[in-house]
Image: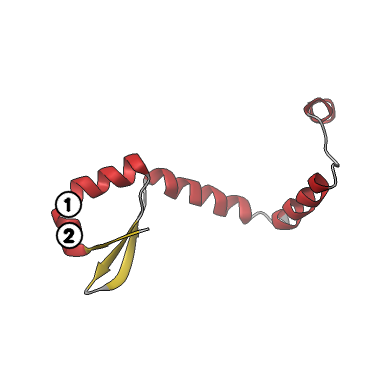
C-alpha cells in the first residue's frame, strides 16, 4: 500500500484518484506523519462490503470450512448433480 501525505494528496489529487480508480492502487493518507485514512477504489469498497455481508450470514464460516475439507478429500458434487437437486 502506498503512503501519501495529505499535502501531497492535495497537490496530486487527480493523479491519485486516477491511480486508485484505474489501477486499483491503495493509499494511506497521513497527517503530520500519522496515518489517518485510506483511499481505495469504489470497486474495492463494494467488494469489501459484499464480503462483509456474506460473512455476516450465521454459520457461513463453518460451512465454508466444511466445504473446504470435503473438497480436499475429493468429496465433490458435479454441476449436473446440483442442477438435478436444486432446479
Q: Residue at x 36, y 52 (%)?
A: 40
Compared across the picture, whether 3 is left or right of 64 comes to left
Compared across the picture, whether 3 is left or right of 43 comes to left
Horizontal and vertical percent position of residue 51:
56, 50
Q: Residue at x 79, y 53 (%)?
A: 66
Rendering quarter of residue 7: bottom left
Query: Is residue 48 or residue 16 the one in the foreground?
Result: 16
Q: Residue at x 19, y 46 (%)?
A: 14
Q: Which residue position holds label 1?
A: 12
Compared across the picture, whether 54 is left or right of 58 comes to left
Q: CA distance from mark 1 to mark 2?
A: 6 Å
Residue 35 to residue 54: above or below: below
For mark 2, does the 10 Å Cα neighbourhood hold few (<14), some (14 to 19), or many (20 or more) residues?
few
Q: Quadrant of the C terminus?
A: top right
- Rendered image: mark on residue 53: none
For mark 1, does the 10 Å Cα neighbourhood hold few (<14), some (14 to 19), or many (20 or more) residues?
few
Q: Quadrant of the N terminus?
A: bottom left
> Do labels 1 and 2 touch, CB within 8 Å?
yes
Rendering quarter of residue 9: bottom left
Residue 65 to residue 21: above or below: below
- Dot 1 lies on which element? loop
Q: Residue furthest left?
A: 11
- Dot 2 lies on which element? helix
Query: Is residue 9 or residue 62 the one in the foreground?
Result: 9
Q: Which residue position holds label 2?
A: 8
Q: Residue at x 35, y 49 (%)?
A: 25
Query: Is residue 85 or residue 78 the one in the foreground?
Result: 78
Amino acid at each position: 500500500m502506498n503512503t501519501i501525505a495529505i499535502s501531497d494528496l492535495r497537490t496530486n489529487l487527480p493523479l491519485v484518484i486516477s491511480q486508485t480508480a484505474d489501477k486499483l492502487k491503495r493509499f494511506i493518507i497521513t497527517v503530520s506523519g500519522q496515518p489517518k485514512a485510506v483511499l481505495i477504489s469504489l470497486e474495492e469498497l463494494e467488494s469489501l462490503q459484499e464480503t462483509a455481508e456474506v460473512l455476516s450470514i450465521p454459520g457461513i464460516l463453518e460451512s465454508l470450512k466444511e466445504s473446504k475439507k470435503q473438497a480436499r478429500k475429493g468429496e465433490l458434487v458435479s454441476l449436473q448433480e446440483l442442477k438435478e437437486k436444486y432446479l
